[in-house]
Image (cartoon, rainbow, N blue to C red):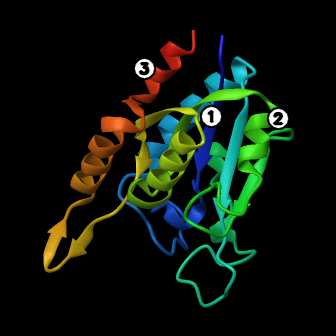
Amino acid sequence: MAKTALLLVDFQNDYFSSYDSAKLALAGTDAAAKQGAKLLTAFREKKLPIVHVRHEFLSNDARFFLPGSEGAKIHPSVKDIPGEPVVLKHQINSFCDTNLKSILDEQAVENVVIAGAMTHMCIDAVTRAAKDYGYNCAIAHDACATFDLEFNGVKVPAEHVHAAFMAALNFAYAHIASAEKLIRDLS
């Protein structure tokens, strides 16, 4: 049986409306993290690999995820425990200039289940990169969050941004399912 790892990407305080000092609260981060926590529990129970990824910008001029800040820390609802690697990234793509691929390869991982934020940025980027590296990808659509966007005067609600990116990734990059379905598939 192919080894499956969980990638929890950028579930960091600055994205949570429930965090008092959030610098970029996304739509539905708390609900997404609740589903992420279910995945985390299932992977821990099955003793499957888990990798936490967190982003810090290199400059204090950044809008959010400031170096060494509380806002850049992993949210308590999906916090790592000893033995679970935490990859620190400075780019949108979790594989870029990090040891993520070596962590997965050292554990002979072939499949990745992805959850986190933001759907239209880091989740999109890590999924496409993982697929390009040859991993089979699944995304827990209800364990991801994003926010409203605007382009050329067109306002796009977060739920539409999320749906558009899930639809695009589902086309050729990943299997898209609920956290509950992906947990059942682990059995």
How many numbered discs sit on the rendered protein?
A: 3
Residue 121: quarter of image:
bottom left
Given residues 34 and 65, the one toward you in this image is 65
177 on left or right of 84: left
Which sits earlier in the primary sequence, circle 2 or circle 1? 1
Image location of residue 123, percent across then percent down? 48, 51
Q: Which mark is residue 184?
A: none
Relative to 22, say whether 32 is above or below: above
Spatial distance from mark 1 to mark 3, Cα to Cα?
14 Å
Q: Which residue is tagged 3?
A: 181
Within-10-Å neighbours for mark 3: few <14, some 14–19, many 20+: few
- SS category of the residue bearing label 3: helix
Q: Would residue 112 be seen by someone viewing this image from the given angle?
A: yes
Quickly name the residue at label 1: 6
The CA distance from mark 2 to mark 1 is 15 Å
Expressed as whole percent of the image width and height from the top left, the position of residue 62 reads: 57, 84
Task: Please tell me whether mark 2 or mark 1 is closer to you in this view.
Answer: 2
The kind of residue tagged 2 is: Glu
Q: Residue at x 60, y 42 (%)?
A: 133
The image position of residue 15, as x and y in percent, is 50, 63
Q: Residue at x 58, y 51 (%)?
A: 9
Q: Which residue is mark 2?
A: 106
